[in-house]
Amino acid sequence: MKTAILGGGTWGVALAKLLSENGNDVTVWSALPAEIDALAETSRHPNLPGVVLPNELKYTKDIAEAVTGSKYIIFAVASAYIRSTAKAVAPYITEDHIIIDVAKGMESGTLFTMTEVIDDEMKKCGISFPLKLVTLSGPTHAEEVARDIPTSIVSACVDEECAEEVGRLFMNSCMRVYTNTDIKGVELCGAYKNIIALAAGISRGMGYGDNTIAMLITRGIAEMTRIGLAMGCKRRTFAGLAGIGDLIVTCTSRHSRNNTCGQYIGEGLTYEEASKKVGMVVEGYYALDAGCALCEKMGVEMPIITAVYDIVKKGEKPEDAIRALMARAMKSELD
């Protein structure tokens, strides 16, 4: 099956490798010509050391070439570029396409999830037919997926048959796929878990230990569930792979950009200094404005999310934010 991967970063390339090895005809497109040239010349990605890409993979700088004839179009660009990529690809979209988003985040201003951004932009571009939109999310670091380490992911779509079709596309001996019709809940998990991972990294950088990480993960999932229920999502989504599963791995893994960036901030660097040191997109930063705006709009208390916002966006000292969190009034764990 012909598939287009829009984005030449680690996650897009890891998925391109998986799909190619599953027997699909895969073309990778990137807005960065140098990225495409390097992939075509070396069959390697600089941030996936030791991983050799299949010779069958194709690379292009022409988005029309990537999309034309493809049934599946995978958005693997950073969240900040989802809208511009949707605009670029809109002229080539037909009713037969299935659009799969693998970016995690929310758009500032609109408070849209990534599939909502794609849908909104394509409607603005004149598409009147209903789009088939799927999101893939879960504890899936590209560095491990590219090395065929056993992994599970969620294929989410309001149309369960469409979610199952996409699941079969990715399923193999190293990738197990579950389906979920609660696409909103799955996407909220993907956005908020990155912010909580920043908090986990900050605490680690301050010299705190495993107790603090466990506290942030546990209370973080409580916050994510609260906002999800307020938005009409299903509680089980937040207890699944896209929720607690992805939160655990993002808060603890050495592969996590958000966790690493947070650690540098906890050690005393500014966000700008920390993100430069990470060298890749830190999605939690870009989700902060929308994440805080949404909880304010819905009247949902999310103290960890707010604390990270105050540290990263307002320059509050991490020790003051932690002190304020610990001084909050006693509450019950039960609803």
Image: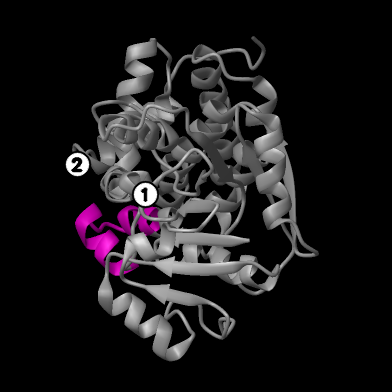
Q: What element carries label 1?
A: helix
* Prevailing secondary structure class for the magenta stretch in the rendered image: helix
Q: Give the range drawn in magenta.
A: 261-278
- Residue pictured at 52% horizontal, 27% vertical: 184
Image coordinates of residue 241 in percent, x first then y, are: 67, 42
Q: How far apart are marks 2 and 1 (CA)?
A: 44 Å
Q: Where is mark 1, residue-wise?
A: 92
- Labels 2, 1: front one: 1
Q: Residue 315 carries which label?
A: 2
Image coordinates of residue 139 in percent, x first then y, are: 62, 51
Image coordinates of residue 260 in percent, x first then y, are: 42, 60
Identify the amino acid type marked 1. Answer: Tyr
Q: How crowded is mark 2: few (under 14 residues within 10 Å), some or many (20 or more)?
A: few
- Residue pictured at 63% horizontal, 61% vertical: 1
**Quarter of the image where one finds residue 252:** bottom right
Q: Which of the pair 118/152 is nearer the observer?
A: 118
Q: Can residue 145 be seen in this view?
A: no
- 173 in relation to 298, above or below: below
Asked if residue 268 is among those painted magenta in the image, a careful observer would answer: yes
Furthest residue in direction bottom, as rendered: 41
- 323 in relation to 271, above or below: above
Q: Is residue 200 left or right of residue 156?
A: left
